[in-house]
Image: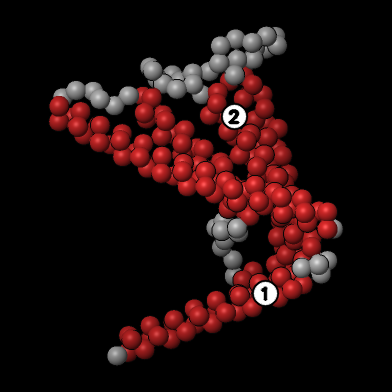
Amino acid sequence: MKTLLRISAAIDAITDRLSGLISFIVVLTIAAGFLNAALRYLGQWLQRTLISNELIQLQWYLFSLLFLIGFPYLLKHNVNVRVDFFYSRWGPRRRALVDFLGTLLFLVPFSALAIYVSINPVLTSWGRLPDGSWGPWEVSSDAGGLPLAPLKSLIIVGFAGLLIQGIAQLIKYGAVLAGVHEMEAAVMEAEDEQAAAQELAQEFREELEHRR
């Protein structure tokens, strides 16, 4: 188990390092969107075409990269969207069991399937022909647009990262279930109770202010 936990920690470290890249991509995406909007309105005022398909599709590229690379980071930090009525009330071990089964039965197979079904379309986009030879790669149907092959390759990269981080999560959930992370589980439970108490106190304060 210690070896597995070291592997999980190494994967987590790589995922956390992506946070800097993600932040940089967010800034670039916002800048690209602002530039596209500014050039469009400036072009209308000057009655000239200032915007180009390259700039528009660059924004698509950046957003796709942000979305796909963000998969493992969201999973690692458990900030994915949840809609539940029971999970938040359960103890750490029961939550770990639910997460373990969900990751093992759904996330890992889905990620592996997504990679598998994407391989041939991505290779075709890079120019592989039915006879096994290679031709030109896929480009945008818009004049002057960016090539699509690198963009489609991000699908495999994104789901590969999600699959690897899912395996790391399985190791951590298994450690909690095996009692290896009992202290960590106790801390998680205490933090959840503290958060619930703070939320309840905030509700009381808002109610008092409303009555005043």
Distance, label 1 to label 2, CA atoms, is 40 Å
Q: Is residue 121 above or below residue 94?
A: above
| x 31%, y 39%: residue | 34
Q: Mark 1 or mark 2: which is in front? A: 1
| Closer to us: 199 or 4 | 4
180 vs 35, left or right, is right
Q: Position of residue 64 (x, y in %)?
A: 50, 37
| x 60%, y 59%: residue | 78
| Closer to us: 60 or 129 | 60
Q: Which of the numbered marks, if any, corresponds to residue 153?
A: 2
43 vs 200, left or right, is left
| x 67%, y 74%: residue | 187
Q: Position of residue 37 (x, y in %)?
A: 28, 36
| Closer to us: 71 or 97 | 71
| x 65%, y 51%: residue | 13
Q: Position of residue 147 (x, y in %)?
A: 49, 21
| Residue that badge 1 annotates | 187
Q: Quadrant of the N terminus?
A: bottom right
For the question of whether residue 124 can be seen, the reply is yes
| Secondary structure type for disc 1 | helix
